[in-house]
Image (tube, coloured by chain):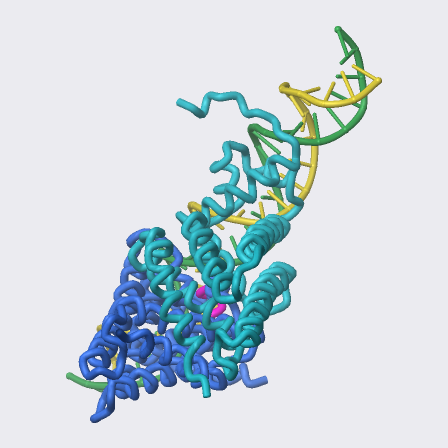
Chain colours: A cyan, B blue, C green, D yellow
Amino acid sequence: MPETEPRKRLSSDARQREIVAAVVELAQLHGPDAITTQAIAEHIGLTQGAIFRHFSTKEAIWLAVFAWVREALGTLLDEASAGPATPVEQLERIFLAHTAFIARHPGVPRILFHELQTPGGSPVRQAVRAMVMGYRQRVSEILARGKADGTLCASLDEAKAAGLLIGAVQGLVIQSALREDPEVLTRDAEAVFAILLHGFKGRCP
Amino acid sequence: MPETEPRKRLSSDARQREIVAAVVELAQLHGPDAITTQAIAEHIGLTQGAIFRHFSTKEAIWLAVFAWVREALGTLLDEASAGPATPVEQLERIFLAHTAFIARHPGVPRILFHELQTPGGSPVRQAVRAMVMGYRQRVSEILARGKADGTLCASLDEAKAAGLLIGAVQGLVIQSALREDPEVLTRDAEAVFAILLHGFKGRCP
DNA sequence: GCTATAAGTAAGTATTTAATTACTTACATA
DNA sequence: TATGTAAGTAATTAAATACTTACTTATAGC
């Protein structure tokens, strides 16, 4: 039994990261509402009460989880839009990096969307809202640069196109959920982006 | 107080429909996990125990809800694909009808996606899975007819394109959730479809 | 090595949830 | 008009949940 190992004590900082990671991992096997403090504790081999040594409330856990997602998506966007690449190249790299990230963490879109569904102004929802809107904004700006340099259609509505790109990711998420196969995301991402990109380029006067 | 009205007795059949409608209505104000039997009962003016006169279990309620959604989406597809319309016209009508339906029932994609997230083979999940896959299949067939008559690109992958179309709807759902405005769906649907359609047509040899 | 701090435990609490129970009563129909 | 069926009620139950508390003890810093 590997459970006989004496529980190691970690600093609260390290434990917090472990808890966040546990939530992300649990989210890919069980739905978000099944992520109880009890389940988290079991997953990392602690008692349920220990969780509250590191987060004063469960809402604080969710906030930490979404802060982690925000940071991960942020660096993802930074890396993809770095260097002397054309807007279209940047878009493709963002799309592929985004889908690859989700393929590695299938629980992320679940908890994200789950929180986005709940109406009202809870702090958690505000955080998710800000994150998604920030993402869309950055994609919009790249699209605008693509319009400026003539690669993309001048009459393209950046906001709607950015929303469509996010929707395309969600479409892949749905497909991979239907087939219970996370690899769908990485396998189909390129082809889907090609269809999408052609739509962005088209219908110029 | 309108609550003084003496509770009318309804046939179990009528009550079941009322319960399903209550769930759909509740889903657009509160998240799916807030739809308790207590909340349902309060919404239609019954006691909580009365719910179980008409559904033996809560899972049975969800199954009935998704049966209702499946039927609604089915007739929607039937109407949109009826008559002597071209495949592209059918696609547009389906897309617009689908988004209009969601704008009228904003809770539907929430509970749908919510259930799709939960892995495992629960009967509810099976039902949702079958519904979405059936929808995608029908869209795929229309896309295939569009390829056959030369309107759409011959090298278009129907399955991926159908998934992208579903994703486009989800993109609009996300946008409307972000702005807390169901009208986004009907307002932006046409423009988004135009971008999408051009992507379907493009890149022919 | 000693000790104070804080990580971890075990056993609680209050609340919420789906489901059940014993009882009541509206209503169709024979 | 009498009666059986089934819709509805009010109270209750068992399980689960987030959170608390009194305690134990590992461990970092002196």
Taking the spot 44% from the left edge, 76% from the top edge, the residue there is A201
Judged left or right of residue A48, residue B139 is: left
Q: State yes or no: residue B38 in magenta.
A: yes
Residue drawn at the location 49% of the way across and 59% of the way down: A94
A80 or B181, nearer to the observer = A80
Which residues are drawn in magenta?
B36-40
Would you say residue A192 is visible in this rendering? yes
Q: Is B68 on the left or on the right of A196, as rendered?
A: left
Which quadrant of the figure contains the N terminus of chain B? Answer: bottom right
Whether residue A33 is visible here, answered yes or no, is no
- Residue at (43, 52) in percent of width and height: A100
Direction from residue B88 to residue A148 in the image, left or right: right
Q: Is residue A61 above or below residue B145?
A: above
Quadrant (top left, top right, bottom left, bottom right) of the C terminus of chain B? bottom left
**Residue A54 at what x, y percent from top left?**
65, 39
Looking at the image, which is closer to me, A89 or A70? A89
Q: Mainly helix, strand or loop, the magenta region?
A: helix
x 36%, y 70%: residue: A195
Above/below status of A109 relative to A160: above
x then y, percent, for residue A22? 50, 42
- Image check: B106 left or right of D1? right
A147 in relation to B55, above or below:
below
Q: Nearer the viewer, residue A112 or B122?
A: A112
Residue B81 vs residue A190, the one in the foreground? A190
Q: Residue furthest bottom?
A: B84
Magenta-span inclusion, residue B73? no
